[in-house]
Amino acid sequence: MGTLEGKIALVTGGTGGIGTAICQRLAADGARIVTTYMNQEKAEKWQADQDFESTIIRCDVGSYEDCERLREQIESELGHVDLIVNNAGITRDGSFKKMNADKWSQVIATNLDSVFNVTHQFANGMAERGHGRIVNISSINGQKGQFGQTNYSAAKAGLHGFSMALAQEVARKGVTVNTVSPGYIATEMVMAVPEEIRDKIIAQIPVGRLGKPEEIAALIAFLCSDEGGFITGANLAANGGQHMH
């Protein structure tokens, strides 16, 4: 029996590189997986490719109304959510000089507003039941900043402020709230970067390699387990030593 047997885990952005590894690991540990999508064709193909049962629900996590509908559908079809992994994210990079309001607001809505929109649907229920796990996926660039990413770095830094504040509100109710800040991980997106640029990135990582999505997923699985219950309000960096903080 898995350590998360009988638990319902909501993973936003679960069809991406890190998201897929998170879903696979939590499912292997016994959780029932629910994930959100925007592109139906991609999501259905993703679902068919997995070897675990999952529920996929169309949801714009940047919209509070969409997230209300998400909660209603999950609760009517499956039951209450025990674990949330706020993983959805996009980039709209550009130097601040060239940054426009659309690029700013799209990233803030998807990467930061979404964490309020999703978590607000379920946190009270978790507190009332006396158990819950919330993990917010930030980034090394939310800790150290990154040229051309004022929007992304601001959103990802904001995630941990949210985690620390909410963690204090729900700690006595058996709910933990943590942040995980991955460094450069060998996802399809990173592997599509030209090799010479990837080599320059790897040269800055003390362990001498990119991270594996499965390594991030294992950390999240621990935080979601009963054994992770004494960790809350933490920002766990998984970046191979690239940024020590």
Image (cartoon, grey):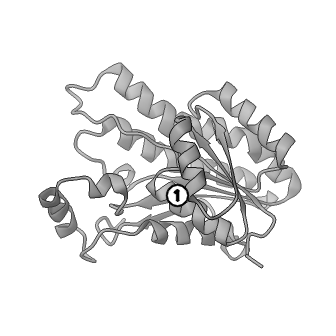
Q: Quadrant of residue 135?
A: bottom right
Q: Is residue 230 visible?
A: no
- Give the x, y percent position of residue 92: 33, 34
At 83% from the left and 44% from the top, the residue drawn is 77
Q: Quadrant of residue 122?
A: top right
- Give the x, y percent position of residue 215: 46, 72
Query: Which of these two is toward me, 194 or 173?
Result: 194
Total residue callouts? 1
Drawn side of residue 155 relative to residue 35, left or right: left
Extreme residue toward the top, this view: 101
At 30% from the left and 55% from the top, the residue drawn is 190
- Give the x, y percent position of residue 10: 67, 51
What crowding class fits label 1: few (fewer than 14 Cα within 10 Å), some (14-19), or many (20 or more)?
many
Drawn side of residue 42 relative to residue 61, left or right: left
Residue at which label 1 appears: 20
Query: Which of these two is toward me, 66 or 188?
Result: 188
Q: Quadrant of the N terminus?
A: bottom right
In this rendering, the answer to whether 146 lies above or below 236 is: above
Drawn side of residue 194 relative to residue 224, left or right: left
At 36% from the left and 35% from the top, the residue drawn is 151
Q: Quadrant of residue 230?
A: bottom right
Q: Secondary structure at mark 1?
A: helix
At 29% from the left and 40% from the top, the residue drawn is 149
Q: Quadrant of the C terminus?
A: bottom left
- Give the x, y percent position of residue 223: 62, 68
Say which amino acid is labelled 1.
Thr
Q: Is residue 192 visible?
A: yes
